[in-house]
Image: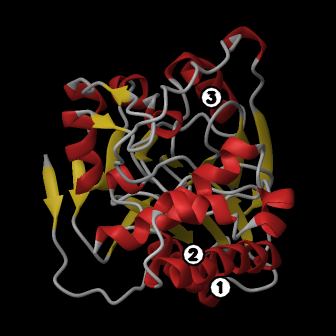
Amino acid sequence: MTRIRLAIVATTASMLAGPVVAQQPPPAPPPPLIDWAKVEIKTVDLGNKTYMLQGQGGNITVAVGSDGIIMIDGQFAPLSEKIAAAIKAVSPLPIKYLVNTHFHGDHTGGNENFAKAGATIVAHDNIRVRLAAGTVAGLTGNKAPPRPAEALPKQTYVGGSITLEVGGRKAKLTHVANAHTDGDTWVWFADANVLATGDTFNNLKRYQNIDYGNGGDVRGMIRALDTYLKVADDKTRIVPGHGPLATKADLAVFRDMLVTSHDRIKKLFDEGKTESEVVALKPLSDLDSTWANNQAHAIGHTRNVFASFQRF
């Protein structure tokens, strides 16, 4: 494995996770079964040989160079053949790099398949650590088992930024400290004015999971959005972790939700309120009507933000 360490690269920088409490809620019900045969991969042309792929799971970004391809995230393993076919429809060139924006399975499930096909998996080193060890969700206790060696990133970095280059295309990878997880990476394609955020941002107008049990923190999420708003302009095509292609205006709306969540819950935390008391007060009730799928989702977001302030 290659570990890339950069001494100084100055760059500032998802719904259910919560603190460990005396009484844990019952495990979440299993997700509905997915009929993989019915999942279709949609390709969106972003210009300058750059594309967004949507299917089931996190969005994928593809940048085509003169001799190979850089791919950002890989969705679930059962979709690898469909994803590969969609990529071949825009270019017959090999996938040289597969970047993981974070460790969650809807973004890394295809790692083994694409690695076996010749791609080098690149990620922040915390992703390698978590995939190798397995993880536990803070709120539900749901466990993800360790992934096999083939699924692990073979080229990692530990902070700041690194740049990948394939056939004249450059992808700048930058670590976001403690945002959605502790291993998030956002990717910038300057030549196409395309920004891929991973799950530090979604364009579903829904609360995003802040995986506090694996290093997530609402303050890091806000720092990430502040960075994106500085990098992006009104013409930037923004590939969110989930949802349709986004604009700078969408980033601003999402950031405002995070800041409001932070400020209201931090005030109650500083007053000495317990998690249960904060949940009962429903400090985000006006936001919940827009941003929550249901009551459980609303409570999960409140608990996630509260848990951020218990980390340190």
Residue 163 location in percent, x, y? 37, 69
Q: Quadrant of residue 93?
A: top right
Decide if residue 124 is on the left or right side of residue 258. left
Residue bearing mark 3: 83
Residue at 62% from the left image edge and 21% from the top image edge: 31
Look at the picture and state if 9 lies above or below 117: below
Mark 1 element type: helix
How far is mark 2 from mark 3, CA to CA?
41 Å
Numbered marks: total: 3
Between discs 3 and 1, the one toward the N terminus:
3
Residue at 48% from the left image edge and 66% from the top image edge: 306
Quadrant of the drawing holding the C terminus: bottom left
Decide if residue 261 is on the left or right side of residue 303. right
Look at the picture and state if 248 lies above or below 150: below
**Mark drawn on residue 265:** 2
**Mark drawn on residue 229:** 1
Between discs 1 and 2, the one toward the N terminus:
1
Q: Is residue 298 visible?
A: yes
Q: Nearer the viewer, mark 2 or mark 3?
A: 2
- Circle 1: residue type: Leu
Mark 3 element type: helix
Mark 1, other Cα within 10 Å: few <14 / some 14–19 / many ≥20: some
Mark 2 element type: helix
Decide if residue 97 is on the left or right side of residue 132. right
- Circle 2: residue type: Ile
